[in-house]
Amino acid sequence: SVTVDGRVTTAYGANVPGLNIPGLYQVEDESGKIYVVSTQGVPTRDARVRVTGTVTPGLNVGGRSFGTAIRARNMKVRY
């Protein structure tokens, strides 16, 4: 598992039928940006978060590629 501590730069609140993905957001830290697939909801843009989960290569949602992502198991939001 991996943990990322950073700032939310992009957030999509979408319930994609059949994919069990209620949310997708991007987190940026000093090393770069990565998308996070969340079943726990989506934090607001500019929120500080700590996300722990599993790396998923080649995430595709609704025909759009998001590259490497984290499937979140645990998320903590700090504003």
Image (spheres, helix red, strand yellow):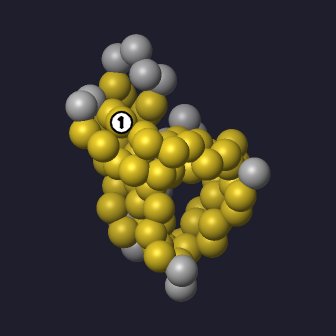
Residue at the far bottom: name it: 30
Residue at the far right: name it: 1
Q: Is any part of residue 76 visible from this angle?
A: no
The residue sitting at 26% across, 29% down in the picture is 62
- Residue 76 vertical placement versus 19 (above, below): below
Kindly indicate the quadrant of the structure image that contains residue 72.
Answer: top right
Residue 31 located left or right of residue 16: right
Residue 17 located left or right of residue 21: left
**Residue 69 horizontal/vertical position (percent):** 50, 50
**Residue 23 horizontal/vertical position (percent):** 42, 41
The residue sitting at 25% across, 39% down in the picture is 64
- Residue 26 vertical placement versus 69 (above, below): below
Residue with the mark numbered 1 = 60
**Residue 63 horizontal/vertical position (percent):** 24, 31
**Residue 55 horizontal/vertical position (percent):** 61, 48
- Give the number of marks: 1
The residue sitting at 47% across, 76% down in the picture is 32
- Disc 1 residue type (three-letter): Asn
Residue at the far top: name it: 18
Residue at the far front: name it: 58
Q: Secondary structure at mark 1?
A: strand
Neighbor class of circle 1 (other Cα within 10 Å; few <14, some 14-19, many 20+) is few
Kindly indicate the quadrant of the structure image that contains residue 33.
Answer: bottom left
Q: Is any part of residue 11 visible from this angle?
A: yes
The residue sitting at 36% across, 69% down in the picture is 9
